[in-house]
Amino acid sequence: MMHGMLFRKAKNHLMTLLMLAATIAVLVPLGLIFFHILKMGLSSLSLDFFTQIPKPTGETGGGMANGMFGSLIMIGGASLIGLPVGIFGAIYLAEYGGGKVSTSIRFAADVLSGTPSIITGMVAYTLLVVPMKGFSGLAGSVALAMIMIPIVLRTTEEQLKMVPGSLREASLALGVPLWRTSLKVTLRSALSGVLTGVLLAIARVSGETAPLLFTALGNQFWNRDITQPMAAIPLQIFNFAIAPYEDWHRLAWAGALVLVTVMFCLSLTARFFGRSRHSG
Amino acid sequence: MPVNGIDSTGSFRSSLNRRRTLQSATNTNETAPARKLNGDLVFRYLTTFFAFSILAILALMLFEMTAESIPSIRAFGLKFVTSSDWDAVQELFGALPYLYGSVVSSVLALVLATPLSIAAALFITEIAPQRLGGMAAPLVELLAAIPSVIYGLWGVLVMAPWLQSTVQPFLIEHLGFLPLFQGAPYGVSMLAAIFILMIMVVPIITSITREVLLAVPQSQKEAAIALGATRWEMIKMAVLPYGRSGILGASILGLGRAIGETMAVTMVIGNSPNISLSLLSPAYTMPSVIANEFAETTSKLHASALMEIGLILMVVTLIVNAMARLLIWSVSKSAKGGAA
């Protein structure tokens, strides 16, 4: 009897150790990735990175200023298209929803968010690049918007559903029309949660590369015209990482550090909004 | 004209609808209430339009992908998935190497990632002190949000050289008699793709498994402990059986992510369309060939063949994701049923 107990205890300890080992095995590569981004990124980052465009091969220095500009413009464009569709779509589901139509809209959003992002790039290519006869920042924006919409839709709907019905009814009982109630009461009360979802969606698309490959294409030079090929930070990281030049690798690491920092700040802000709602 | 906004028998929503139709009939004569109503009507049309545009986007996607694939489907039929000729000059396209590469890389990545993720999730939820577990959860979620191009950057500049200098020579020397580990150490290879995919899907599977495990009722675990079970026996008896289908769903969701993963894999797999048993040789996947060739297609048929690969990819991920969602959903449903 004692022997059995000892055996069982030993097995328990062994399994606990194995689980600990697995947790460490999971964390080590991820820690290494952060370590390398920090180490290589910090040593490659300079003021030039934010003010210069990439130098031709063979010349040292240069930066990703055009990529940062392009990313900002395309993410801005994607938000202009994606946020209204996502938020108003969610209001529809929350206010008029119910029934088969809403279920199919939710299902469509789920399918869209599960689709590999490179497919959205292909679709934006056939819809915009082919008719416009050229790659453009606009096509990139549309591809990013298609990724943003389902994320914003689902998070906003979740938040709107959490607003108590009594609040809505009180507003309607005071004679406020439904549309004002939706915007000024329901959406307003859920605002911080909605904002969290919006920020997370922006963080998500700011790192997207595959949908930009054949829409925005990338650009070695300055371009302020949204109908022309545009540079973007993730595209530049990709192109520079697979190029055989040491100097371009350094730029790619610096770009990765900037991108991860921006995404980290966005998700921290999102968490802050999420938390202030719960405590306040 | 009887204008009655309140419907004593119908629901709130139907009474609203009724009022809307009744009053919209009157809004040609009356101006003041008509303006209010127009606001509601416009708002309803606006939100309906945006909501339906999501259906339209999905329909448009499926339509475009199918329509653009038709030339390739017509030209090659079933041979598209059984042939490995990929020759843009002679316009012969067969996608077998890409299918093979996608299946092998994502399935093997999943085989490696699943046990690690389950063990890590168990450690976080059942064994680690609660404060530590609370810290691990947002960390894991943060890792799941890192863009794939950054995993790829690390993979091609740090991991692949390390594989080439250390791991692959070791495998060749000690396990070289196996067909899995033959050939020269290139660094970029199927093995590199499997590793990078494993690193990428582990945070996803871990965080979903953690949620599934948190749904296991406390009373189940306490009952096991009360019967004298050790902690591991409790996990084996009470926790794992309860979460089984949810954990399966989590790993299938990871599979869906791995199949569709583009950038990181493209950067480390070597992009060479051959079918080789050896994990050390470069390979190619469906998303990678699209990423590399779609912007510079040489002919209509070439573009169409890539579109067909995209269509296959889309359908496969759709099926995989639907399966995963059903499994996870069944767990959360039974958890709710059990609590009630």
Image (cartoon, coloured by chain):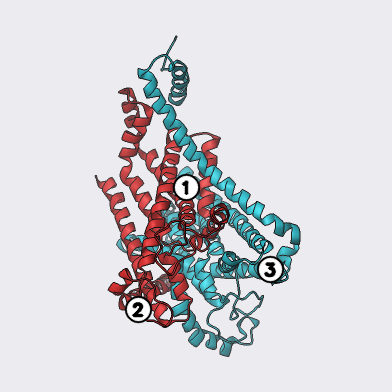
Chain colours: A red, B cyan
Mark 2–mark 3 distance (CA, rounded to whole Å)? 43 Å
Task: Identify which residue, B122 or B51, lies in the foreground.
Answer: B51
- For discs 3 and 1, the disc positioned in front in the rendered view: 3
The residue shown at (32%, 43%) is A191
Q: Is residue B197 left or right of residue A252?
A: right
Q: Is residue B75 left or right of residue B104?
A: right
**Residue, far left:** A280
**Which quadrant does the C terminus of chain A fall into?**
top left
The residue wearing badge 1 is B335
Q: What amino acid is at disc 2?
A: Gly
Tag of residue B223: none
Please tell me how many numbered marks the rendered image carries.
3
The residue wearing badge 3 is B96
Q: What amino acid is at disc 1?
A: Ala
Assign a secondary structure to mark 1. helix
Assign a secondary structure to mark 2. loop
The residue shown at (75%, 57%) is B74
Q: Earlier in the sequence, mark 3 or mark 1?
A: 3
**Residue, far top:** B1
Question: What chain is tagged by disc 1?
Answer: B
- For discs 2 and 1, the disc positioned in front in the rendered view: 2
Residue B133, given in percent of the width and then of the height, sits at 35, 62
- Marks 3 and 1 on same chain: yes
Q: What amino acid is at disc 3?
A: Leu
Q: Quadrant of residue A184?
A: top left
The residue wearing badge 2 is A61
